[in-house]
Image (cartoon, rainbow, N blue to C red):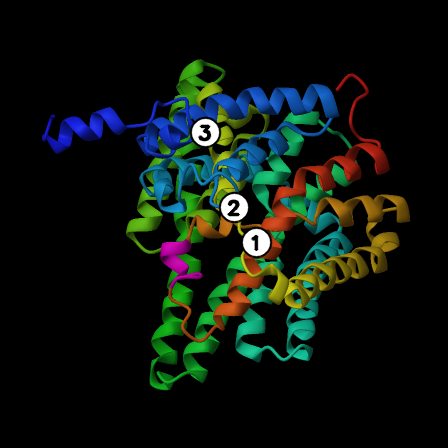
Amino acid sequence: MNDNPLANADVLRAPLWTLEGLRSADPVLGIALLIIVAVVAGEAVRRWTRLPRACGHMLVGVIASPLALRLLERTDLDPWKPLLDLAVGVLVFELGTRIRPRWLIHNPALALQGVAEALLAGAAVTGALVLLGVAPISAALAGAVAMATSPVITMSAVYEWQPRGQVTERLLMMTALNSVLAVLALKGWRVVATADGPLRAEWLPALANAIYVLCGSFLLGALLGLLLTWLSKPMRRTTASAVLQIGLLVLGALLATQWTLSPLLALLIAGIVARERMGHGLTVEPQLGTAGTALTVLLFVSLGLVSTVENILSLWPWVLAIIVARALGKGLAIVAMSRHSGLSLKQALALTLALQPMAQSALLLGASTYGWPGDAPLVEAGLLQALLIAVTLMQLSGPIWAQIALRQIAGEVPQRS
């Protein structure tokens, strides 16, 4: 009989192709296998159901998550966080390159519509939760998060279907605008939370920090955009330009994190400035090439892995209130101003549906900076869980909402796709 425990462990170790073997595998190997399965599943979903590939990618993550087979734990994603942040940063930067700020100047009703849909959605969620007995400070946090539409879902829809039209252009504009407003609201929430909490005397430093983060992020983003403009001149329309863009994105994200700024704001502003300065001279390959596409698949698998519906049976009134109030707030603002901004009622409905996917990835890109939700001691734990469930539901179904809006209702997707 062999008394060596290591030898016995090797004998008893389950084969890799079994469920127990997969659970005991190296997390890096496990995620690599999930990416391969996700690519195949995405194509299968696309071919057999005509649903977006992202649905297949996220479904694989859900199946491997603690919600189903528990092949991986959420903590197994920690070593991959820099790559996930880069994937989000790539999509946020490319969203910025598609924004035309002058459009907001030429069409003030569009600018007002974009601000109104974000603010009304946040106010509606906050008010609905307060009516259900949630503390105002906790409800306000949920309202701030509910303002944002997921840039990841929006950009993946634009890449997959190549839609063209008024609804698509406004979707891109409003996704960028409400993401910025959500960041501003979260910083404002922290100032108010500090002022109303036990550290009342620290509200002034919190306000100063908020101003520093916002101004610093805008300044860093502008500098990155100008630097990209200057460095790109000798290498425009070459393969080296994509490498330069990735390098600058990594640099910007690292600097923003090190200086406690907002990577989301910095990279979004960088894309806007680069487009304004370079015009059509800025050639951005979708998802910055094949490597960026692989990162995006990893990102969607990770979104499935971090999905949660824990305690949904007890928290469903809050979850339902967040989803319904947010949809009503955005819809009322868009429909009310549709005529003034140049939209038909049908287009307004399509835009409302396309804006429904909530943002988790873009906000978590700056989680270490904004302290959400890790260091939010004034927020009820149940409310945070309800918020995460609502984000999970709207994020997993987000590609379907976008497809219905852009293809079936707006009719802006070419027939060939």
Q: Which amino acid lies under the numbered mark 2 shown in the image of this protein? A: Leu
Name the residue rendered at 42%, 69% in the picture: 376
Residue 158 image point, x, y percent: 66, 31
Check residue 360 for magenta coloring.
no
Q: Quadrant of residue 283?
A: top right
Please name the residue that numbered disc 1 is placed on. Answer: 309
Residue contact between numbered discs 2 and 3, judged by CB atoms under 8 Å: no
| Other-residue count near label 3 (Cα within 10 Å), few / some / many at <14 / 14–19 / ≥20 | many
Q: Which amino acid type is shown beneath numbered disc 3?
A: Leu
With respect to residue 301, does 260 lie above or below?
below
**Which label sits on residue 67?**
2
Part of the protein shown in magenta: 367-374
Left or right, 247 with respect to 109, comes to left
Marks 2 & 1, CB-CB < 8 Å contact:
yes
Label 2 environment density (alpha carbons within 10 Å; few <14, some 14–19, many ≥20): some
Residue under numbered circle 3: 295
Which amino acid, by three-letter code, is at mark 1? Val
- In this view, the residue farthest toward the left is 3
Give me the residue at 85% from left, 60% from top: 336
- The first of marks 2 and 3 along the sequence is 2
Q: Which of disc 1 and disc 3 is earlier in sequence?
A: 3
